[in-house]
Image (spheres, coloured by chain):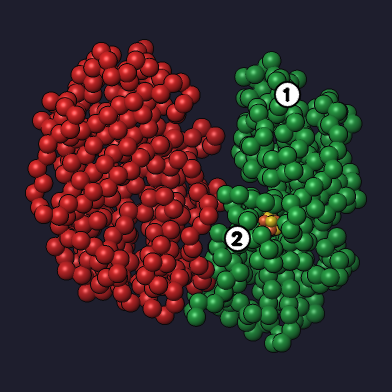
Amino acid sequence: MNKIQEIIKNIHLLVPEGKRVKIMNVCGSHEHTIAYAGIRSLIPENLELIPGPGCPVCICPESDIVNAIILSKKEDVILVTYGDMLRVPTQNGSIRTEGKNYRMVTSPFECLDIARAHPEKKIVFFSIGFETTTAPTAALLEMGVPDNLFILSSHRLTPTIMEVLVKDTEVGIDGFIAPGHVSAIVGSNAWNVFSEKYGIPTVVAGFEPENLLLGILEVLRQLMYKEARTSNVYKSVVKPQGNKQAQKIIEKYFKVAHANWRGIGYIPYSGLELRDEYSVRDAKKVFMLREVKEKNTAGCICAQIILGKSYPSDCTLFRKACNPKNPRGPCMVSFEGACNIWYKTNAAFTSFS
Amino acid sequence: MSKIEIGHGSGGSLTKDLIENIFLKYLNSEELKPLDDASYINLKREKTAITTDSYVVRPLFFPGGNIGKLSVCGTVNDLLVSGSVPEYLSLGFIIEEGFPLDSLETILKSINDTAENAGVRVVTGDTKVVEKNKCDGIYINTTGLGELVIPLFLMDVSDGDIVIITGTVGDHGTAVALARDELHIDTLVKSDCASLHELLIPLFDIEGLKWMRDPTRGGVATALAELSEKTGLGVEVFEEKVPVREDVRFISDMLGYDPLYIANEGKALIITSPEAADRIIDNLKKHPLGRDASVIGRVTSNFNRVRLKTRIGGERVLDLLEEELLPRIC
Ligand code: SF4
């Protein structure tokens, strides 16, 4: 028996018969691995792997995207952002369909070249995501940026949203698979609160199927022995303290603030804004952007999915009116979005008989 | 630098200049030369296969090929996987005003080289010019005619048949995606764009060859999902048997693509009886284009969809997807 088969066998042994066990994989990339490797077809039926909130474009508030579209229409502005953001639908279309001057980048550092090549324009980097993408944006600021470069910050904090999920008893999460990339920045210690305060086993895992399965097994082991610890099976990448350097520069440029999550609303202390010292870089202030009232597609249950309360297949639009070619909600856009992943892999389909 | 002008498509003297000085420089079959309204050709067999395709790939030039080479290979391969030997080709061009003549020459040279290599003769053609911004550089339509050697029908596919792919999957789509300037990734990935005549014609004699397909847009997964839908049969695919280049796998992981759904332009998907599978694989492996040929699955009547057995033994469905992964890939 190879190692993976062995892990799977043990998973079967540890899932108590007749009882539902719910493990939330916080990160969209984990959902990607689960769906593409067909992990759900290998585990007991009563073990639920629930996709969580870790899809950056899914939770980015509609207001910020609408503002990004507005900015891109200004003659003297070039809006720069990650590829997936271009296709996220809003009440006013997407950046791609309605925007005018926009560019896609894979890394914030590309903004420097764009800013230098267009000194007559104002370059606005629409910077979204969790700790993993905040760090490079902070590093960009630390490098020193040209005067014509501004940041539209829509960064969010993973631990805060996880705490919201834990407090919501409707879901009843038994264990967390903590996001591997985010953990590399914040450190595995950042999750101690879940095991210590809430008694929920929390395991940091990587993105290879084997490592992820190992993480699931560790959660089950703790549940079996009624333990609640923060464990790390992704030690090659994640340290207990995380990346101190990255934490330091994030802290230097950003401050924690109340933040809006798409479809969910404001969550206290869940986002990051540029510190007041850097107001001259803050696109929200420089361009005096106003908050736009959210108006999501009727029937889209993205927010429910992000909060672990529904699966994509529960949405009446899923695979019908909503598909990756014509996404009706943000979860169908990016390959970290649960609806997109479930669409492409038929994750809801488990029986071939 | 000289450029295409609107007058080049007028049918007047500029058109004549363009045809005589540029097109005929590269394309000079006996059939084409008289430049009459129609060309006369001889068909060797009673049955002829015919196919047509339009090419709008963006960008026009990409690692491993260009729109010219693609427009010949694509149509030639369509004939080949239909069990016929490609013989004749027509070429229709729609060119944007302002298109550089030297790019046109590069494309024409590619067309000629590829056609010559594949043993097809370009026998008729047409050129139209549209105003600037009314098309994206150049579009090409090709129609191909070939002598039908062995008709292949989907209804002959049956329970127990073997599924073979002639080489690595996902190369073309990945190379073209990377050639678009939005992504700044340096790799050695090249399009697999190639004519498969030397690889596939020898298979026509093998008893048990049932059906072939060139898995272009939508890739191997889409081709198999269509097969399953039309026949009502199931297909089991083994992920670990599907050859994927390391770099293609890496990039598709990064971009969230599945190599099984990425376009190929120099591969054939072959369905064969189990008895003929070894002979077909041996034959394929003799040719450089078939070096990585592999049995990737089998047809079954136990279920009726395409089931992928993942590397770790999991299962998932490969379905027709309502998404064009990359628009204008060919
Ligand atoms: S399937 Fe589409 S509409 Fe439904 S929840 Fe997902 S993104 Fe929203």
Does the closest atom of ligand 1 sit within 8 Å of the Cβ of label 1? no
Chain colored green: A
Left or right of B40? Residue B74 is: right
Left or right of A88? Residue A2 is: left
Task: Report x, y in % for residue A43.
Answer: 61, 77
Image: A117 above or below B325:
above
**Residue B184 has which mark?**
none
Residue at image point 70% right, 20% down: A75
Is A306 or B55 nearer to us in this picture?
A: B55
Left or right of A340? Residue B83 is: left
Residue at image point 43% right, 33% down: B59
Task: Report x, y in % for residue B4.
Answer: 36, 17
Q: Mark 2 sits on what residue?
A: A319
Q: Are marks 1 and 2 on the same chain?
A: yes
- Judging from the image, mark 2 belongs to the subunit labelled A
The kind of residue on which mark 2 rests is: Arg
Image: A341 above or below B180:
below
Tell which quarter ligand 1 is in: bottom right
Q: Mark 1 sits on what residue?
A: A74
Shade representing chain B: red
Is residue A244 visible to us here?
Answer: no
Residue at image point 76% right, 46% down: A60
Task: Report x, y in % for residue A110.
Answer: 62, 31
- Judging from the image, mark 1 belongs to the subunit labelled A
